Amino acid sequence: MLLKMLRFKDASVPDPGTSIADFIAAAGQVVGGQAMPGVSVNLPGPPLPVNTPSLGKDPNAPSADDVLSGVPGIVGVIESGHLPPTPLAVQLDWNFSVDGVPGTPKPNLSASVISVVPPIAFNDLGTRPLHTMTISVSGSVYVPNPEPAMPNLATYTIDPPLSVDVDFPGIPIPRLLGLFTWPKYGTEPTSGDTDPDDSSLLVMLPADSPLAGLDGVSSALKTVQETAVPIISLLSGPLGATTFAPFVPPAGIVQQLSALIAGVEKMTTRMSVASHGDYKAAMLIPASANLNSPTRGGIDDLNGIWWDKETGGLDHDYYHDHAKSLLWIAPPKANVVIYRDSHFEWDKGDVDQHGRLTMTTGDTCLVGIPEFRPNPADLDPVLSPSIPGLRPANTHLDGYFTNEHPPTSNDDKAWTDSVEFL
């Protein structure tokens, strides 16, 4: 008998949980090419769109045109006409915060598993506080209805939202003020002066700094570099499609840490220069406590601190009147104040004779002043970049530091006679 088609009489289409084998058993059997009478079956569930059930081509037949020809033992492909079950779907709202500061939410995501890039956090060197990132998710999980415009087959709403806290340490940042006697952080001669012994670095520490000696400073700066470089490598590579940065874009974090490393290298490069004879390539001075800032203190008089003796030893090169560039490295929002006069003196009524410069770090942990004369408030755009989503560094200048008002050139004498860490 040539059997071209198998039809099921008055049979309802099974729900997604009914197997093909159960369906065949309920509707009829094919034995030796003979069709048994159909059995009417009522199954639960809304009516679904169907195609006409049919016997198709046997994929194992030698000819692509061969179908069941009544030969016993040949099994065809049964097309039930039933649409495949639809998978679970999600529509989730993700929210993020670090230390209570919210990031950009990610609503209506179809991803149930995501990777999150937290912001880069910094700590004062010597402290080990943890930062907390809170991730919460709300929304729904549902089974879509294959029938257009029909309600979901099932829906589960996440209410109240699920939440998890993740603790992570920050990068330890030392507080260091570097005064360079050459512009561009000791890399560029001034006024045609090419004598390398005229370039030196004075490193100043707050009174509560845990560092000791230039070796301690070098070790702390090396730790910053070793911590930041792997993060830059990670975020510079390809990121997955479900990776989100709700606080700062990965490119912004790379720029942020690259600026920090560039500033660290300015100081470490100068400290690596060898001293000789009476010449000191770098010196370190810790602050002492003062009434204005009893914890971090200040240096109330930089007069008399020299790095090189002149010919015959009758004169010296002093730091206080050779400031050409400055670099302030510290955690975000940290302040240092530089005074033209000793003992932190400041008279706002006579700005021609007094000067005060406040430098505040941004989220790059740096304030760079590449040319202290004649523009002591002009930030270095490379070391202090303006990055979307991050606070920029800033300076505030009162009065003058040079002997000409206003200053006219880099040759104008400038004084930096006291420093205060806030």
Image: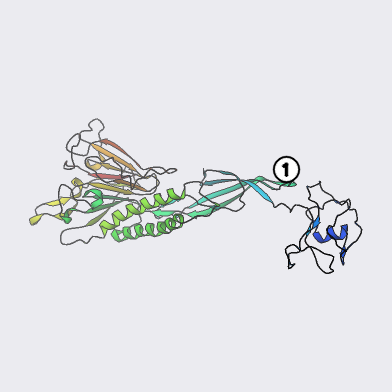
How many marks do you count on the picture? 1
132 sits left or right of 12 in the view: left
Q: Residue furthest right?
A: 37
Q: Is residue 367 above or below residue 34?
A: above
48 sits left or right of 31 in the view: left
Q: Is residue 232 above or below residue 337?
A: below
Whether residue 292 appears in this view of the structure is no
Residue shown at 24%/30% (left/top)? Answer: 349
**Mark 1 packing: few (<14 Cα in 10 Å), some, or many (20+)?**
few
Residue closer to the observer: 26 or 95: 26
Q: Position of residue 161 (x, y in %)?
A: 64, 46
Whether residue 184 appears in this view of the structure is yes
Residue closer to the observer: 292 or 354: 354
Q: Position of residue 261 (x, y in %)?
A: 35, 54
Residue behind mark 1: 148
Q: Position of residue 322 (x, y in %)?
A: 19, 47
* Kind of residue indicated by mark 1: Pro
Q: Residue furthest top?
A: 349
Quarter of the figure that contains the C terminus: top left
